[in-house]
Image (spheres, rainbow, N blue to C red):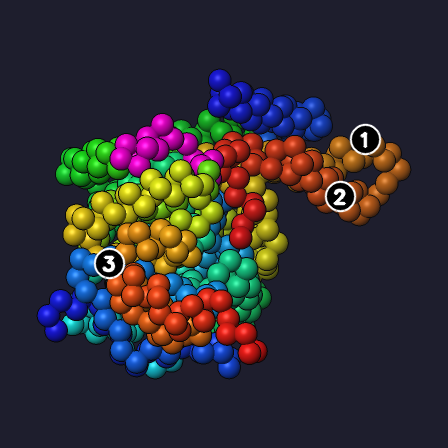
Amino acid sequence: MKLSAKWVVTILLTIFSIYLVFVLNEEGPLRILFNLLTFAGIYGLAAIGLNVHFGLTGLLNFGHASFMGVGAYVTLLLIPHAAGREGEITESGLPFLLALFIGIISASLFGLLLGLPAIRLRGDYLAIVTIAAAEIFRLLVRDLESITGGVYGIINFSDSLQQYRPIYFENFVSRYELNPSQVWVGLLSWISILFVLVILKRLTNSPWGRALRAVREDEDAVRALGKNAVWLKLQSFMLGAGIAGLAGVFLAFNYGSLQTTTFVPLLTFYVWAIMILGGVGSLSGPIFGSIIFWVIISETDKLAALIFENANGQQLAGVRFVLVGLLIMVLMIFRPSGLLGKKEELLLNVK
Amino acid sequence: MSNNLIRVANLKKSFGGVKAVDIDDLSFESKELTSIIGPNGAGKTTLFDLISGFQEEDNGEIFYKDKNITKSQPYRIARLGMVRTFQLTKVFDRMTVLENLMFAGSNVSNDSLFQSFMQLSKQKKYENSLKEEAMKIMKDLNIEQMSDSYARELSGGQKKLLELGRSIIKKPEVLLLDEPLAGVNPKLAEDLLEIIQSLSNQGITILMVEHNIEAVMKISERVVVLAEGALIADGPPQEVRENQKVIEAYLGTGDE
């Protein structure tokens, strides 16, 4: 009974936020909605990966952006693209799916590389190391212009994914005046979410998932019972990093160009906010959290415009973040476990 | 090396200038129930930490079944059959009592990512037998009515029981119990003692750090007394009880 109440509230809130998009936008609400849903899918996927780290295993990872970045850069550099100031074109490349696979594996291996020295650290220290590592990654990518395109980024890579877009899909989407390539990226990210959730559902209910939760609760006891806690944590780190890598690839395709500025710490914090909103430790929480979060992010300035009639755009943009902050505070006060989180497994009182 | 199951030699550990453990030679025999007593700060828990691998010694060596385990990781030592509990009970708070026990009993390959992804019938069978075992242990420990509660909902004493149960399901050869009776009501303490006694009767070697002297004297076959990290007495309970050094260590000599 209580469980279903939680779901009813979550689904009603999600429907209400989608409804808000239609109310607040007179022109092209559908296009705005699909733009939002695409971002929601991509960020939701990233938040699911983060939930493997934090919700399932208790690892404080504040460098999620770097895992997304590794996935995106490796994949894009392996497919036909143009990079750097001159837009140097690389015409040959691997097939998209193979490149994607390598990209995801690279993100996992980056997780392993980062985890090997760092994962023995407790709680807050791991947070510091991951946030630093993510910044080092971003600055490295920015400065290694000959390989990564540096500040000029990577462009002209979209065809590798868009070539798979069926023609009837394009016709159907165009009928509603939507951008077919964006909706295609969005659709694929949501399909990936389903796919990842099915696998994670299987894993979290298994002895392996049970072992990760035990690590989350008390590492010393895990070790005293003859289990290799470090290896368990590394596995979790790699799995979550791989999921983040996949999300990073979709993020790049959604933008159509890849910039180092995408992977600033703010990206990590957005993903954290989504996970907390949806419910730490809840598998499907992040998807609802993500939709609601993106509606808030994109529609609060319109809400603010209703309240402050004479404010200009810049002022409104400031108000937006005040409202987002307020909302998160209200949520933390009234429902600290997030929309779909279990109250009994409230995780934010991390030791 | 007849019956010596655990042997420490030249073991030293200091924290800053304070000597926590300084033992020349100490052995524990197979199947014996030994208590380690001593005033606060005598180095009892540190000795446990060193034996179980949770702390690294400054000097010295530790042998288990004549195998040098001095620098071994805690989980490796536990896999050899030596399982410990903690002074401050460490249960998995946000997991159910049943999950606590099943996790403890589960072996390494059952926990693996690969097996958990495949979920073959072999794993299901293993999990079922694990569950049965856990149920039996909960019944023995009288916490079966709590099987689906989160471990953090248990009382302090029940947590002690759960921690003990988690060790039992591992079928250890050696149990290191760190203050198993601390903070437990007298009735439960009696039950716990009975359980510990019966584990000992089953042939499990038990080392126990405990402050409850009466309980120690009642069930121990051998008592080892530490003070300021050093061994000051060692022998059967009666003998130790009358040892002048032990009385001084506990009551103070009066000339300080």
Residue at the disc numbered 1: A306
Label 2 residue SS: helix
Q: Earlier in the sequence, mark 1 or mark 2?
A: 1
Q: Taking the image as drawn, is residue B248 in sight? A: yes
Q: CA distance from mark 3 to mark 1?
A: 81 Å
Amino acid on which disc 2 is placed:
Val
What segment is highlighted magenta in the picture? B138-154
Residue at the disc numbered 3: B221
Label 3 residue SS: loop
Kindly indicate whether the residues beneath marks 3 and 2 are on one polypeptide chain.
no
B135 w.r.t. B69: above or below: above
Residue drawn where x is 63% and y is 28% of the image: A17
B118 w.r.t. A235: above or below: above
10 Å crowding of disc 3: few (<14), some (14-19), many (20+): some
B125 w.r.t. A259: above or below: above
Q: Which is more toward the observer, A197 or B203?
A: B203
Residue B164 locus on image (x, y percent):
32, 46
Label 1 residue SS: helix
Residue B251 locus on image (x, y percent):
49, 67
Circles 1 and 2, Cβ within 8 Å, touching? The answer is no
Residue at the disc numbered 2: A322
Kindly indicate whether the residues beneath marks 3 and 1 are on one polypeptide chain.
no
